[in-house]
Amino acid sequence: MNVAVAKTGSGRAVSDLFASAEGRLPGSPSVIASRREAFETYERLGLPHRRIEEWKYTDLRALVGEVLPLAAAPDAAALKRAADAVKAHAIAGARKLVLVDGVFAADLSDVRALTAEAGFRTLRETLEKDAGLLTTASTDAVIALNAAMATDGVVLSIADGAQLSAPIQIIHIATAASASAFTRSQVVIGKGARATLVESFVAAGAKAYQVNDAVIVTVGDDADVAHIRLMDDAPDAVNVTSHFVTVGANVKLNFFNMTTGAAVSRLQGLITLAGEGSELSANGVNLLQKTEHGDTTLVVDHAVPNCVSREVFRAVIDDRAHSVFQGRIIVRPDAQKTDGKMMTRALLLSDEAEADNKPELEIFADDVSCGHGATSGALDDSLLFYLKARGLPEKQAQALLIQAFVGEAVEQIADDGLREHVIGIAERWLERRS
Amino acid sequence: MALLEVKDLKVRVEEREILHGLTLTVNEGEIHAIMGPNGSGKSTLSHVIAGKPGYEVTDGQILFKGEDLLEMAPEERAAKGVFLAFQYPVEIPGVTTMNFLRTALNAQRKARGESELMVPDFLKKVREVSKSLNIPQDMLKRGVNVGFSGGEKKRNEVLQMALFEPSLCILDEMDSGLDIDALRIAADGVNALHSPKRAMVVITHYQRLLNYIVPDVVHVMSKGRVVKSGGKELALELEESGYTQFEDAA
Ligand SMILES: Nc1ncnc2c1ncn2[C@@H]1O[C@H](COP(=O)(O)OP(=O)(O)OP(=O)(O)O)[C@@H](O)[C@H]1O
Ligand SMILES: [Mg+2]
């Protein structure tokens, strides 16, 4: 943690981190006041550490230590690199909304191509009025820090009944080394709408940077939504992301998270099923190598009856990497006829690889069908030998079996094009294996 | 010319010697049958030739086209033309048969310095061979051997053999689990591959297979050795009298 302390105009002491950023944070004076409050909450709590139950396996204090200062505005060279990164990581046909070092980049985005059905503003714009988007019910320190420091984000509102044919892709690009980007976005999906949201995190030449992102999603009744998050940050970066998703009635929500980058990462998600008859498919893959630490923590809260949730997670862990999966299914007292299943498997590619699986069921209703399963193990030698006996060298035989393993989660992505895109990222990860 | 020469081979598995000095020579164009009681070491021999880990060769050698096979990794052996149709083919969920066949064939071609087979040529070839083996196309879209019946797994092994065109084919109990029609189809597939440059080693318990795949030489294995070799009439003799006469010889 950054412990340097500075006196500010108001006479109260806050650390350099906030004081040096304050002048550049968007928002009216009242917004700045609530940011300061959030920062004080963060300072009181400090970075999460292993004695906080939710953070037991991901001790940010030990793994990250200090929060880096806010990134400076990118120069022309950085923007050029960002433009190249956008080209390299864009999904074919997607409407791109690009954030460079935490600030919306209109020149790199397709705002004009968004139809009238997809209302768009930046977080910066909304903060000129009020701090509404900076508040969440959470008491988590990294979320408080995000509320204090968020510089920008995407605020999207998909109209009722809109049928968006093109995916909307939010691309987070890091160009600044040894600096932080704080972003916060909100996506409201109208009743009966159909939409695909993709979020990508990539580096454009930046090293050792930190990302703290928060996304608030509300899905209206009868909507059909695919939400794909692809975190491929630089291998020495830190990415901590918090999702808050509230789902209405008769919704189909297909969520997928892929972790292929960052030295330390955590996706913490809370998905609340707040309307009856909805189906949630939440899946993910952690592909980790070297000394990477990747944490996926997901709470699925069945607040009402008659919803189905399915979770399929796969982790492939090489070298001395460490994968964490914490999955909690909560079934509230009213939520009868809940059908919730969670299956996680870890594939350990080296003796020093580590997997922590913590599935939890908190069931307060009696007429439910819930279950979870977790396994971890190495590649099957007899399968490897069969492939080698057919001419595949060791690495290629391993790659084929790893792809098959990962495929069990990837096949949950309904859209063919997105699935192929994800398989491509997995293939590039396999090529990076030493 | 000798394709495969196994000389005085001694093999241990988990500290126990299974093959006690086995000698076998197979020439180009020949069909050899190996028969012998359960546990006599037939599969062990085939695994050691294919390069399966877990077997310790304590003595003897195996030459393939004059080269020391034991020095080669399993994939090198495959690329050089050694093929083992397994007694128990494994299931590989999530790897479609089609993808597996193409990856394997191209890996072998690459190791031999040949170019990759173009997709249309590959597909044409697979379609031809699978048709002749009575393997439906949609089976090829499923995971390797996943949900295949015993007989389908065996036919899938013969399909691979036809596709990879190895020079030495070892068939370990290809006939077990096959019904009479399937046996004939698989045997026809094997016979179609027979050529003056290619040799077959057929491991079986039943003379019936040898009515379809007619051997030049029949070997009797017992307790980790070849105890007798002869012409195809030896198989008929065994069918009559069983293996007891060889137990002492071993
Ligand atoms: N991995 C192993 N560990 C311990 N013993 C083994 C192993 N593999 C083979 N053996 C032993 O080696 C001996 C020979 O086995 P092998 O499978 O080669 O026989 P086989 O002739 O193929 O028999 P079958 O006709 O039943 O297929 C048996 O006694 C078997 O138990
Ligand atoms: Mg056997």
Image (cartoon, coloured by chain):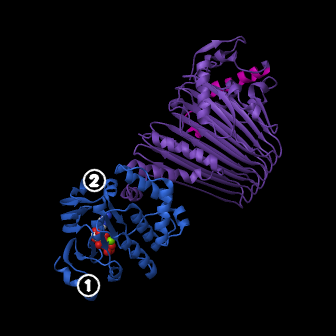
Chain colours: A purple, B blue
For disc 1, the marked residue is: B238
Give residue A139's position: percent from left, percent from top: 68, 34
Q: Quadrant of residue A77?
A: top right
Q: Is residue A248 above or below residue A54?
A: below
Q: Residue at x 22, y 55 (%)?
A: B68
- Which chain contains the residue that carries disc 2? B
Q: Residues within 10 Å of mark 2 (few under 14, many from 20)?
A: some
Specify the amino acid type for callout 1: Leu
Determine whether, in the image, residue B201 is placed left or right of residue B120.
left
- For the question of whether residue B96 can be seen, the reply is no
Q: Residues within 10 Å of mark 1 (few under 14, many from 20)?
A: some
Determine whether, in the image, residue A130 is placed left or right of residue A300.
right
Q: Which residues are magenta?
A: A30-55
Q: Quadrant of residue A180?
A: top right
For disc 2, the marked residue is: B72
- For the question of whether residue A404 can be seen, the reply is yes
Q: Residue at x 76, y 44 (%)?
A: A164
Q: Are marks 2 and 1 on the same chain?
A: yes
